[in-house]
Image: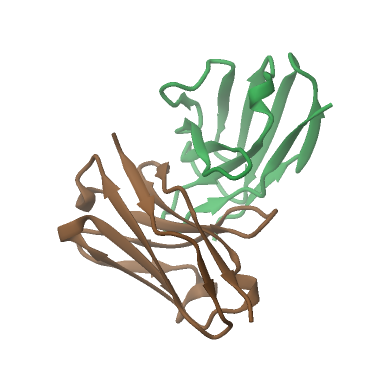
Chain colours: A brown, B green
Amino acid sequence: QVQLVQSGAEVKKPGASVKVSCKASGYTFTSYDINWVRQATGQGLEWMGWMNPNSGNTGSAQKFQGRLTMTRNTAISTAYMELSSLRSEDTAIYYCARVVGPIDYWGQGTLVTVSS
Amino acid sequence: DIQMTQSPSSLSASVGDRVTITCRASQGIRNDLGWYQQKPGKAPKRLIYAASSLQSGVPSRFSGSGSGTEFTLTISGLQPEDFATYYCLQHYNYPPLTFGGGTKVEIK
């Protein structure tokens, strides 16, 4: 069965970077885009960006451009999301998600806390 | 970018009620829309895709309709396990993806 398993919770200081992993199983990793979505506490879902695991092509929402980097390691079917220059407003749960018209599978989420 | 306006933002309902949630797109999106249910502390779960197709394993009391700019999620006969937050998501011009603001369904 399709699974997306994310890395564990992180606590970071303002200005630092965080890198979250998303390991895919149960399907051919390079066949479907992986997207990243975040959710601040008590708030709605916010789309961050996309990656084609086959080509490595990526794109992000304008508000994250310059701070968001998405990469992958196809040998281990894992996608990565790195967000830099963290600020308190980046405290949220970060989800990876497989996009099949539209999102069909989600990771379990990774809590990133930004605090001094 | 396409904007998705979801209403209401919250509602109170009783077990057995029929509940309707609406999403309006800022431009036509054909039927490129999904509906998701999210419970506290959990990732969203897809209920509906292509505006009206029921995801495998989802109870038939959930249904979706609409095309173009106006879409509806209906829960016919609300059950205790249906109290959650619901989101629409458009993928017409992916990327990007655009979510509605969410509707929290609470117990009356």
User: Percent position (x, y) of residue A103?
Assistant: 42, 44
User: Percent position (x, y) of residue B1?
Assistant: 54, 61
Q: Is residue A72 left or right of residue B62?
A: left
Count of numbered tags: 0
Quadrant hosting residue B88: top right
Q: Residue at x 70, y 53 (%)?
A: A42
Q: Quadrant of the C terminus of chain B?
A: top right
User: Percent position (x, y) of residue B84?
Assistant: 66, 35
Residue A50 seen from this side: yes
- A83, above or below B77, in the image: below
Quadrant hosting residue B106: top right
Q: Residue furthest right?
A: B108
Q: Residue at x 77, y 39 (%)?
A: B10
- B66, above or below A51, in the image: above
State the residue in front, B20 or B108: B108
- B36, above or below A95, in the image: above
Quadrant hosting residue B80: top right
User: Percent position (x, y) of residue B57?
Assistant: 44, 21
Q: Residue at x 34, y 55 (%)?
A: A34
State the residue in front, A39 or B68: A39
Q: Residue at x 28, y 34 (%)?
A: A1
State the residue in front, A3 or B85: A3
Q: Is residue B68 left or right of residue A75?
A: right
Q: Residue furthest bottom?
A: A15
